[in-house]
Image: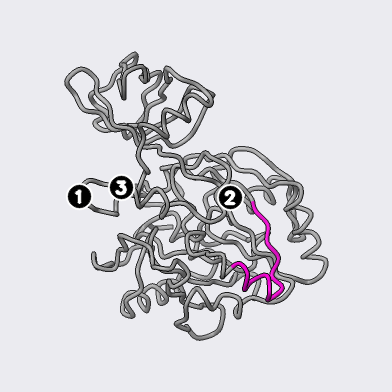
């Protein structure tokens, strides 16, 4: 499909630089009915049904942005996918300063060597520390990898260390937050439980590639970066039980949806169930995709011409999403990672 189909004009003032306070005070555009409805995230329990299963991503963001030097040159590296205990793929700036064998110093005793170079400043870095020692070094010297569209003097700050983690965060490994999960609070989870909504988790270690713009004119030519994900046995069991009882699967965020669809696709599932699964996925969902696993999606508002806007357009229809985003812009909704949310139902399952 042509990239221009997924473009729209977004005023700069619609981009959120901080989350709502409290988090569940964010606005919610309800698209599950025939007409658009302006609500709040706190209304979510009323929009779901007893017996629904809500699945969230329990990945935890690590401080994956590093600032270092190579000689006199200043280098910034944003990690995006772990390859081994001591190696990560990263996007480096300025990439032209680096060659194979270049050593970047981030702190005394904390360095990385460039083992591979790719396009767009992508490099494979092998660190002087490994495993838990590397994680400890990232915690000490790294910064929270806020998306490039959040523009603040000085970049991320101490507040982001909490703001950019979801209430579900458990498994360290993401370099970007699964942002739909940022809206949840203990009181909202309690209200969902009282409503009879069950909960489960998957893991997808979100990579910085999620921020990369699509630069090709035809979506068929776009290459997705892979990310590691898993569906635990208990979640697979709960999905099967929910399907058997006639309940719906509610995905919190596009990362959860992609994990479930990748697992279902790998198993060739056609009955809405999802197997236990773990592995890398570079699933790229565009209009025409037939969803296997998810009935309802809670997600934030995404960038123009992004793979995530393509995904929601596949889920609920391109024309409907174009109209929904136009409504959200005119009604003052806040966009992107720290912004507001929308609730979508799967178009293909409503036919």
- Secondary element at image label 2: loop
One can see residue 351 in this view: no
Query: Which is more toward the observer, 120 or 150?
Result: 150
Please tell me which residue is depicted at 36% across the width and 58% down the height of the picture: 305
One can see residue 253 in this view: yes
Q: Residues within 10 Å of mark 2 (few under 14, many from 20)?
A: many
Q: Which residue is mark 3?
A: 156
Image quadrant containing the C terminus: bottom right
Give the magenta-colored segment's residue range.
Answer: 189-201
Q: Is residue 203 above or below residue 30?
A: above
Q: Residue furthest left?
A: 72
Q: Which residue is mark 2?
A: 58
Taking 50 as reference, is 46 left or right? left
Q: Which residue is mark 1?
A: 153
Residue 120 x/y as whole percent = 32, 35
Residue 315 x/y as whole percent = 55, 65
Taking 136 as reference, is 57 left or right? right
Please tell me which residue is depicted at 35% across the width and 73% down the height of the picture: 333
Task: State the separation of the CA atoms marked 2 and 3.
Answer: 22 Å
């Amino acid at each position: 499909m042509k990239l221009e189909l997924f473009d729209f004009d977004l005023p700069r003032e619609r981009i959120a630089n901080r989350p709502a306070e409290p988090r569940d005070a964010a606005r919610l555009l309800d698209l599950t009915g025939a007409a658009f409805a302006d609500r709040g995230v706190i209304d979510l329990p009323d929009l779901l049904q007893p017996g629904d299963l809500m699945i969230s991503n329990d990945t935890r963001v690590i401080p994956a942005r590093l600032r270092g030097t190579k000689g006199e040159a200043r280098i910034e590296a944003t990690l995006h996918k772990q390859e081994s205990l001591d190696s990560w793929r990263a996007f480096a700036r300025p990439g032209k300063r680096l060659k194979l064998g270049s050593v970047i110093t981030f702190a005394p005793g904390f360095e990385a060597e460039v083992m591979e170079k790719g396009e767009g400043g992508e490099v494979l870095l092998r660190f002087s520390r490994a495993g838990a020692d590397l994680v400890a070094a990232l915690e000490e010297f790294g910064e929270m990898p806020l998306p490039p569209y959040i523009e603040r003097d000085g970049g991320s700050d101490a507040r982001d260390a909490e703001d950019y983690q979801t209430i579900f965060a458990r498994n360290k490994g993401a370099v970007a937050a699964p942002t739909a999960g940022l809206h949840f609070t203990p009181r909202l989870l309690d209200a969902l439980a009282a409503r009879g909504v069950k909960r489960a988790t998957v893991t997808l270690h979100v990579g910085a590639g999620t921020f990369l713009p699509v630069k090709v004119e035809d979506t068929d030519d776009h290459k997705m970066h892979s990310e590691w994900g898993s569906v635990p046995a208990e979640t697979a069991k709960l999905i099967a039980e929910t399907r058997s009882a006639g309940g719906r699967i509610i995905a919190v965020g596009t990362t959860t949806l992609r994990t479930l669809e990748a697992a279902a696709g790998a198993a060739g599932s056609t009955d809405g169930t999802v197997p236990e699964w773990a592995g890398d996925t570079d699933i790229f969902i565009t209009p025409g995709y037939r969803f296997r696993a998810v009935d309802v999606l809670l997600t934030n508002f995404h960038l123009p011409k992004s793979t995530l806007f393509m995904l929601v357009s596949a889920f609920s229809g391109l024309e409907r999403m174009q109209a929904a985003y136009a409504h959200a812009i005119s009604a003052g909704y806040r966009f992107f990672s720290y912004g507001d949310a929308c609730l979508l139902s799967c178009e293909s399952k409503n036919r």
